[in-house]
Amino acid sequence: MLQALINEVIELGFLPQPVSVWRELKGGTQSTVGVLGTEDRPHLYVLKANTKELIENETRFLSLYPDIGLLPTVLYVDPALRYFVYDFIPGSTRYVRGNKRKLMTALVDGILAHYVHPESYDAYKSVETTEHTEDSIRYAASFIDGQLSEEDHSLVAALSRERSDVTDRGDLYVLHGDFGVHNFLFTDDGLAGVIDPIPVIGCKRYDLLYAFCSSPDELTLPILLHAVQRAEEEREVDIRLLSRDMILELYRRISTCLRFHPEDFPQYLQAWGEWKKIYASS
């Protein structure tokens, strides 16, 4: 299929530079992805194919944010929504741990600060409903099981019930939705790009906590507080509510860790204990 789509792209003739070589990318994405270029510059463009719904959602998200330099620049969207093409962003998803404050600052200033409110609040799924919170916690619990205590599971269930729907539309934005280190591209100079959105509607804090917890290093209150205050324009932060939201996100991340990166579990478990103490003392 990829070869046929690439032939179609070449025949359409919209690429700024003619391409002569391509290769398929293999990885965690569910999409079919090819990188196109020349013999001298093999990485010029990316062709991404997926279901119609996913292509529509991703390209609509990117069209909202054409001025965010960290996001892909879309060159072409297939009218049938089988695929789209964007400029290749150089970099690697290998995040060097121990740079969490620098990373969070770059994400807040480069992405979150530019988020906009949705034109339609039905355009994407909302992550700020009680139903979404409770469903995501139940799903995470099914994988965590005995790795955390019954007391821990009960705490999280209680916190998820406590978290009410966000009804103030002034707090709701169109978010990336899969805002973790696996979708961040880095060069020697730091953060170079953010790819593969799964757009949702929610508060900026949703993407921020997702990014913060997506690697197990430096999950500390001072670093998180600095990022939250920067993202929320220096509004006073309620530490108890922040630690509640952090515990819920950390619980979801522990579930992901156990499924895909079990070697990180000891670090997450240490952070889990520390954040429970922060919540209890706030």
Image (cartoon, helix red, strand yellow):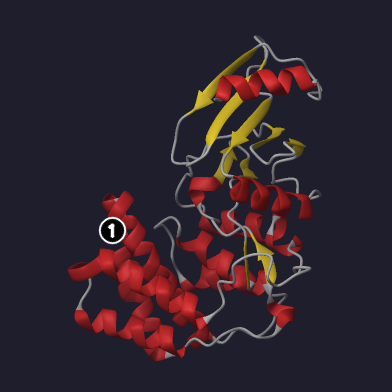
Percent from the top left, x then y, of residue 221?
48, 73
Residue in the foreground of this view, choosing between 225 and 264: 264
Q: Judge from the rendering whether residue 169 lies leftward or rightward of residue 211; answer left or right.
A: right
Q: Which residue is mark 1?
A: 265
Q: Judge from the rendering whether residue 197 lies leftward or rightward of residue 274; answer left or right.
A: right
Q: Quadrant location of the C terminus?
A: bottom left
Seen as rendered, the residue at the extreme front is 80
Percent from the top left, x then y, of residue 39?
65, 9
Q: Residue at x 61, y 83 (%)?
A: 166
- In this rendering, the answer to whether 28 lies above or below 103 is above
Q: Quadrant location of the N terminus?
A: top right
* SS state under label 1: helix
Dot 1 alpha-carbon crowd within 10 angstroms: few under 14, some 14 to 19, many 20 or more: some
Percent from the top left, x then y, of residue 254?
33, 63
| Residue type indicated by callout 1 | Phe
Please identify the quarter of the rendering in which residue 137 is found: bottom left
Percent from the top left, x then y, of residue 15?
78, 23
- Residue 106: tell me if it is visible: yes
Please identify the quarter of the rendering in which residue 36 is found: top right
Residue in the foreground of this view, choosing between 113 and 23: 23
- In this rendering, the answer to whether 34 lies above or below 17 is below
- Residue 65: tell me if it is visible: no
